[in-house]
Amino acid sequence: MAVLLDVKDLTKNFGGLAAVSDVNMHLDDNELVALIGPNGAGKTTLFNLITGQTVPSAGSISLRTNNEGMQVLNGKKPYKIADMGLARTFQNIRLFKGLSVLDNVLISMTSKNKEGFISSLFRLPSFYKVEDRLRKEALDLLAIFHMEDMAETIASNMPYGAQRRLEIIRALATKPKILFLDEPAAGMNPEETAALTATIRQIQQEFGITVLLIEHDMSLVMNVAERIYVLQYGKLLAEGTPQEIQANQAVVDAYLGGGV
Amino acid sequence: MKKNLKYNAIWLAIAVLGWVLINVFEGVGIIDQFAENTLVLIGINIILATGLNLIIGFSGQFSLGHAGFMALGAYAAALVTQAIPTEGGFVLGTVIGMLLAGVVALIIGIPTLRLKGDYLAIATMGAAEIIRIILVNLKITNGPAGLYGLPQLANWSLVYILVVVTTIFTVNFIHSRNGRAILSVREDEIAAESMGINTTKFKVAAFVFGGMTAAIGGALHANYIQTIAPNDFGIMESINILIIVVMGGIGSMTGTFAAAALLGILDMVLQGFGALRMVLYSLALILIMIFRPKGLLGTWEFSVKRLFNRTKKKAKEGA
């Protein structure tokens, strides 16, 4: 399998604190990778660096594109990076709360279906045609996750689990190559987590995309991940299959505080 | 497709009906010169406030500089119609005013829209003040005395038509893909950016659009009132427009219409009270804010489509 995203010596310093230092990682096509580590290890910072919310201090991030080979993402605006095929969810849900579920999904489709300023003022027949097509696509996408009945519900009125699911759907609507999930199971009960596990597998298989997820729920991680990266104090501590990680003494020490 | 045509036709019918009704009322004498004057001012306020509502209510950017753009439209139209006192001159002046306002909004918007909340409000207020001070100091604008004796080219029919046209464009804009992108900026800027939306571009687009419609309002103001001075476009005018938006409900175009009409009528009725007028006007505003803190209509929007579906449902239940 070919490398899709390549991260080299990535570093981010906040003043004197190295939140992420010299991280090397790669994501291949259609892979399900997990990123774990104790609280404050720099997992979310790493996500923010890759998706452009935070600008790296050093190192490089490059993405394989269809026609231009490997493209460096450093310094690109988040919306450009999203446009190139990196979509994410947030640790603390960031839906468009006041809008309907359908609008939440439709907004994600705008960047791939641009329209001119002038043509949005005059309702030409093409406006209705594209609008109908997008609406159908959005409803189909919601149907895959059994949320088509909620299309007109205001996002903030939905239960917590459904909001988390909508965030994933909204990210998928941008037609990404790589999906970044930041603690998708946070605050979920065991049944919801089990359902989420199935959903994540389903996304990887049906959409054929690569998934990188941050998660603290080890049952989920060990269940779905093909490879695991472990971060501690901003440095990569270990990398390997779930079995290898479980057997790694350094990882166990990092979590349980060994070596005293 | 056909359905959309139907709804659009209904809206057109409502607009034409409104025009005919006002015409008839004027014919029978229900609307006299004084009432017509109020009607025109309400119309101009609607044009100004829908643009500001697009900026504040839909893109979520708090602007206090709307009167500045209004001034640009007013002065452009005034200067052109002084030279060419015809309808064509008015159109030319309005278009020049709109372009000018658009360019100025772009220049102001790109740096200031990085700010948020109170800071943005102060920056836009400052920008409007700069426009006003420039108008006071230029020779061509006749300084603080302003321009007077302008030809009266705007009448209620023209105002009515422009209210309809700007409202259609504004609402179409809001309910397009671009409009949805603007809404997403209001809802959550970080999330919008992560979904591939160029938030700066859409914020500036809403700001420029609002500024351009304000110029139309300004042009009508100049050629209806026939005198303009820089002080007409100070901070108080911006606040007057803001009051309409806030009172109608931030994010509701229907509310803007209702509030502009209500305040216009209130103002007319209170003319008879002399010095007490502003006291009563303020009191009315305070009462509305106490009992309807989210504005008259909140974010509720009148929709022919929804009305249609509801009556259809009722008819079905009845059968």
Image (spheres, coloured by chain):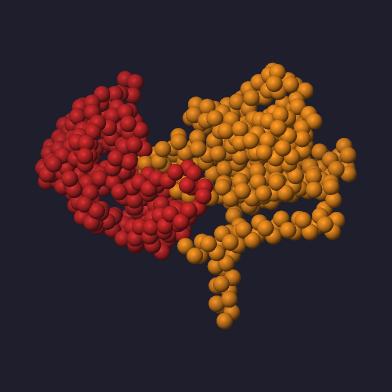
Chain colours: A red, B orange
Can the viewer see residue B246? no
Task: Name the side, left or right, on which A32 lies relative to A133.
Answer: left
Task: Name the side, left or right, on which B126 lies relative to B38.
Answer: left
Residue furthest bottom in the image:
B319
Closest to the observer, A92 or A201? A201
Task: Name the side, left or right, on which B102 lies relative to A172.
Answer: right
Image quadrant in which you'd find residue B150: top right
Provide residue A46's location: percent of width, then percent of height.
Answer: 28, 34
Q: Quadrant of the C terminus of chain B?
A: bottom right
Q: Is residue B311 above or below residue A75?
A: below
Residue found at x 68% / y 19%: B138
Task: Name the side, left or right, on which A165 lies relative to B208.
Answer: left
Residue found at x 45% / y 48%: B177
Residue found at x 56% / y 59%: B8
Provide residue A237's location: percent of width, then percent of height.
Answer: 17, 33
Closest to the observer, B278 or A66? A66
Provide residue B95's location: percent of width, then percent of height.
Answer: 61, 36
